[in-house]
Image (tube, rainbow, N blue to C red):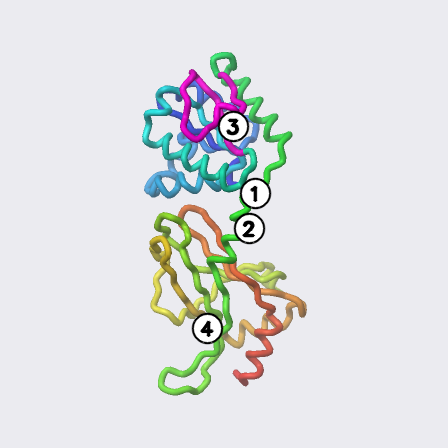
């Protein structure tokens, strides 16, 4: 999987002069770096607690904390490093690359972890060492990003009865999603993706517009809350799917306002077409 950033920088404002030189050098060398001044427009209006949780836990290959006496005292740097430590524990792979301006110790970062002493290294030198690290070390994506998605999103096929009777009225794709994050999330409208491109459209991704549930997106979900939404399948959609390969599949995706992406189980389009035809929809 691709990360949004190669590296995130976590630092106290008092140490900005040094860190900004590092960020600029990385940026000039084509490194995708999360540095707050580069993100001012994007951060404007966001829930920073949730956004930084994403950035420092899932958004990058590496996190570089610039540890100092100031760093230990700040609310935001404590939030960032706790989030980064959580990522390191969950994945058990190299993620935090600690650097130090002094001998301050941070709870959760073992003294046995290799660090760089910034009293002996210039900002430009550190930036080039980060670049070398990115070149040499293969990154293992978060295991949870390969597993949590299927556990939290379910895609089902639904036969739909008429509102006033049990007469069949159509076929729908139903999506169930549960927020398993510890904090609330704003969830965007689900979309669908086929394994093969649609003929004449050149895209695999699409939205279904006829929603049968009274749900407005984005929807706020607290930890443990769920939503269920069903979209009606139309004859025109099925006719397009008939042109797909026999082994084509469809999958649902759900995204959050902080950039997370969750995927569902897959269904074969051929089987959906069969059910559609068996019901005799015209």
First in residue order: circle 4 vs circle 2: 2
Q: Count of labels shown? A: 4
First in residue order: circle 3 vs circle 1: 3
Nearest the eye: 68 or 261: 68
CB atoms at circles 4 and 2 under 8 Å apart?
Answer: no
At 48% from the left edge and 16% from the top edge, which residue is drawn? 118
User: In the image, is 226 to the left or to the right of 273?
Assistant: left
Disc 4 to disc 2, C-alpha distance: 29 Å
First in residue order: circle 4 vs circle 1: 1
* Magenta stretch prevailing secondary structure: loop
- Dot 2 falls on a residue whose secondary structure is helix
Label 2, on which residue?
146
Disc 4 to disc 1, C-alpha distance: 36 Å
Q: Position of residue 251 (x, y in %)?
A: 54, 62
Label 3, on which residue?
97
- Dot 4 falls on a residue whose secondary structure is strand
Image quarter for residue 274?
bottom right
At 59% from the left edge and 71% from the top edge, which residue is drawn? 240
Disc 4 to disc 3, C-alpha distance: 49 Å
Label 4, on which residue?
232
Question: Magenta residues?
Answer: 95-117
């Amino acid at each position: 999987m691709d990360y949004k950033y190669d590296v995130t920088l976590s630092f106290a404002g008092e140490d900005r002069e040094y860190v900004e030189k590092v960020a600029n050098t990385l940026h000039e060398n084509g490194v995708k770096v999360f540095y707050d001044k580069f993100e001012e427009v994007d951060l404007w209006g966001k829930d920073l607690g949730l956004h930084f949780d994403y950035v420092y836990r899932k958004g990058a290959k590496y996190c570089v904390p610039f540890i100092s006496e100031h760093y230990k005292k700040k609310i935001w740097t404590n939030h960032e490093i706790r989030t980064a430590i959580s990522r390191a524990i969950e994945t058990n792979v190299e993620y935090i690359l600690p650097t130090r301006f002094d001998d301050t110790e941070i709870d959760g970062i073992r003294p046995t972890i290799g660090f760089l002493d910034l009293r002996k290294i210039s900002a430009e030198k550190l930036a080039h060492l980060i670049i070398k690290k990115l070149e040499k070390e293969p990154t293992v994506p978060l295991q949870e990003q390969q597993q949590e998605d299927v556990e939290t999103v379910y895609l089902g096929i639904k036969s739909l009865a008429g509102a006033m009777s049990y007469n069949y009225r159509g076929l729908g794709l139903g999506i169930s999603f549960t927020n398993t994050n510890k904090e609330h999330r704003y969830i965007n409208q689900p979309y669908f993706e086929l394994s093969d491109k649609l003929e004449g459209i050149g895209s695999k991704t699409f939205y279904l517009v006829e929603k049968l549930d009274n749900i407005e997106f984005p929807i706020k979900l607290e930890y443990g809350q769920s939503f269920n939404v069903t979209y009606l399948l139309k004859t025109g959609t099925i006719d397009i799917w008939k042109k797909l390969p026999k082994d084509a599949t469809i999958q649902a995706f759900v995204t959050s306002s902080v950039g997370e992406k969750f995927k569902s189980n897959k269904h074969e389009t051929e089987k959906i077409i069969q059910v559609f035809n068996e019901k005799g929809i015209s």
